[in-house]
Image (cartoon, helix red, strand yellow):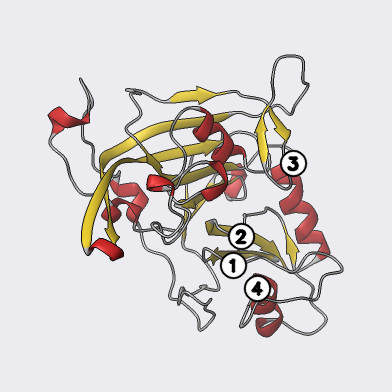
Amino acid sequence: WERDGLIAVHKPFDMRIDLPKGERHRWPGERTVADWFEEHHPPEARVRFCNQLDHATSGVLLLASTKAAGRVGSQLFQDRRVEKYYLALVLGHPPWQDEVQLFDRLIDGDGFARRIAQPGEVGEEAETHARVVKRGRWPFSVSDRDATLAVPAALLEVRLMTGRRHQIRVQLAAAGHPILGDATYGGEPGGSSAVAYRTFLHAHRLRLPLGHDGAMIEVEDPCSFEEELEQIPEAEAGRGAALTDLNRSLESGSSAASEFRNESGDACPPTCETKESANTR
């Protein structure tokens, strides 16, 4: 999707959006989102990031190719007028029957990690809404034993109401269900970092008030997390826990991929598909 200098692209997992200011060191063979932008735009254009995604997180990222567009996009996020939806695979089966709201305040921890603020600590306000989409098992191979094991896991749809660093990762871990593959916050099955091939967090959808008369435009970037789960009998999912399929609205396609790829082979399309809604909330 591209309009008036705003561009929505797919960021693969394990890819940085750019190099930190003043840093020139690159990992072997590294390509960043900023590299893709420079290759597909005039030399005088400079990329501006309207939102941020962690290196390990995949999904839709909003860029701007002009200063004016950058102001518009960044202001929408700052004013919390953008609806941000994520998909996450977490360890365990959350008992939630309906959407839950997480309000834990966040504070910096050791290094770049964060933690939940303790009583007496100020911390940052953070609000996350989450619902269970599907419960199942996530299979993984144990190479030294030539065996395949499985751990209980669930697919969540998460709506980010605020935009704090590591917010979803920390709050889900604090709720007892860390994101699968998130080594920083306890998401390694069996404590082994070699089990999960990625951190299973994906920025799935943005809803932007940029349509006609303020209508919401949905920018979607589908992913295959649902396919990662093995189905389990409903009785094993917990009392009253329905095994629901991923809403079909989460499965609409994205535009064709360009040649931009990271080391894992994931492609970065120049744009994501959109649809315009009459909802002017």
Q: Are marks 2 and 4 in contact (CB under 8 Å)?
A: no
Marking on residue 78: 3
Residue carrying label 1: 15
Up the image or down, 241 lies above or below 212; here it is: above
Give neighbour class at mark 2: few <14, some 14-19, many 20+ (Cα, 10 Å): some
- Upstream in the sequence, badge 2 or badge 4? 4
Cα gap from disc 2 to disc 4, whole angstroms: 10 Å
Cα gap from disc 3 to disc 2, whole angstroms: 21 Å
Cα gap from disc 2 to disc 1, whole angstroms: 5 Å
Give the percent coordinates (x, y) of residue 14: 55, 65
Amino acid on which the number 3 mark rests in the picture: Gln
Give the percent coordinates (x, y) of residue 231: 18, 45
Element class at badge 1: loop
What residue sits 76% from the left and 46% below the top? 75
Marking on residue 55: 2
Give neighbour class at mark 1: few <14, some 14-19, many 20+ (Cα, 10 Å): many
Give neighbour class at mark 3: few <14, some 14-19, many 20+ (Cα, 10 Å): some
Q: Are marks 4 and 1 in contact (CB under 8 Å)?
A: yes
Judged by depth in the image, the label closer to the viewer, 3 or 2, is 2
Front residue (pair 204, 124): 124
